[in-house]
Image: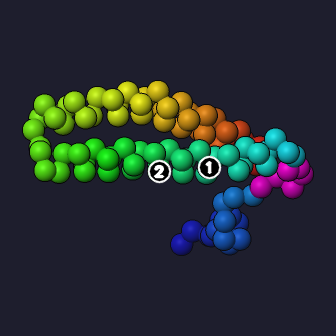
Amino acid sequence: MQPVPEELKEGSFYHPKKDVKLGPVLLFLTGIVPLLELFVFCYSMAMGMQMASAMFLNFTWENAVALALPRIRMYLILCVPLLFVSALAEARVIKEFK
């Protein structure tokens, strides 16, 4: 039988730095991550629901492609950069706490 490692005895592998100072930049980055991701989620859901309602009674592949192309373009122009900024902010916050 193997002895139990100290990390498991304490109940967690995560040990944050004791001297982390939550400055205004770090607080801003911590707050902006969920706001950006929530905005992208809501915007994507709205685009999908609008497309679904437009295709509900008149479904054809031509109609589906015609409705999807502008939404894909807007997703690439708006949502992908916002998710990239959110990922950078989240990585910076995580790096500060490790």
- Marks 2 and 1 sit apart, C-alpha to C-alpha, by 11 Å
Instruction: Determine whether 84 is above or below 96 in the image.
Output: above
Q: Is residue 76 magenta?
A: no
Q: Residue at x 48, y 36 (%)?
A: 79
Residue 19 in the image, given as x and y percentages of width and height? 90, 51
Q: Main secondary structure of the magenta part?
A: loop
Q: Earlier in the sequence, mark 2 or mark 1?
A: 1
Can I make out residue 91 in this image? no
Q: Position of residue 70 (x, y in %)?
A: 33, 29
Q: Amino acid at mark 2?
A: Cys
Q: Residue at x 32, y 47 (%)?
A: 50
In the image, 42: left or right of 28?
left
- Disc 1 residue type (three-letter): Leu
Image side of residue 44 versus residue 28, left or right? left
Up the image or down, 29 lies above or below 6; here it is above
- Residue 42 shows which numbered tag? 2
Most foreground residue, 80 or 96:
80
Element carrying mark 2: helix
Query: Which residue occupies 18% across, 36% down?
Result: 64
Tag 1's secondary structure? Answer: helix
Classed neighbour count for the residue bearing mark 2: other residues with Cα under 10 Å, few (<14), some (14–19), many (≥20): few
The label on residue 35 is: 1
**Residue 51: % across, % down:** 28, 44
Query: Residue 84 at what x, y percent from top left?
Result: 56, 33
Magenta residues, start to end:
16-22
Residue at image point 49% right, 32% down: 78
